[in-house]
Amino acid sequence: MKYLIIDDDDTFCSVLSRVLERQGHQISTANNGLQAITLCENHTDLDRVILDLKLENESGLSILSAIKQILPDVEILILTGYSSISTAVEAIKLGAINYLCKPASADEIVSAFSAPQNSTDDVPLPTEPTSVNRLEWEHIQRVLKDNEGNISATARSLGMHRRTLQRKLQKKPTKQ
């Protein structure tokens, strides 16, 4: 399979690229919409696209539309740390085959492409709601990314003392 990974997080791109390459796939990466469109125009044999919903100054939804105009048969998976029902619905309407929330493992990403698109089976619901600790950890990670890793700016955004934030960041995330 030939994948295009579109994400502004260089670390995520390189890690996911290495994992997929070890599985025998060919990988191209782009950090913004212009790079992605250029790659799609030059590589019309792409099979799958992994697209971040929120790039630095761009919406993944507009990039999704542009890619679908160039490569109407390519499978596109939206991957985001900013999930919402409205963006999920819009992404599917625009032609995405699936929508995953970050953090997602490489296995989850690959299996999202092979999930039946028109399945009438019930989606299994978790038996327990997500824990408050997990929700807090995910929210802190999002705000930290928005502040480009700046601890002081993140603490101000969250309305907490910088040292308190540092202690929370030292803890490992909970599973649920």
Image: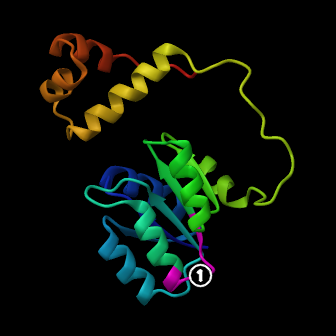
Residue 34, quarter of picture: bottom left
Q: Residue at x 23, y 17 (%)?
A: 166
Residue 16 x/y as whole percent: 47, 55
In the rendered image, residue 71 lying in the magenta stretch gets the answer: yes
Q: Residue at x 34, y 70 (%)?
A: 33
Location of residue 169 with respect to 94 vertically, above or below: above
Give, as a three-letter code, the residue at label 1. Answer: Pro
Whether residue 96 is visible here, answered yes or no, is no
Whether residue 27 is visible here, answered yes or no, is yes
Q: Residue furthest right?
A: 121
* Residue underneath mark 1: 72
Location of residue 128 with respect to 15 vertically, above or below: above
Task: Give the structural element (helix, strand or loop) at label 1.
Answer: loop
Q: Residue at x 78, y 58 (%)?
A: 116
Location of residue 84 with respect to 67 vertically, above or below: above
Q: Residue at x 59, y 53 (%)?
A: 89
Residue 87 x/y as whole percent: 51, 51
What's drawn in magenta, residue-wise? Answer: 69-76
Residue 54 x/y as whole percent: 37, 53
In the rendered image, residue 68 lying in the magenta stretch gets the answer: no
Front residue (pair 37, 149)? 37
Quadrant (top left/top right/bottom left/bottom right) for the N terminus:
bottom right
Location of residue 126 with respect to 44 vertically, above or below: above
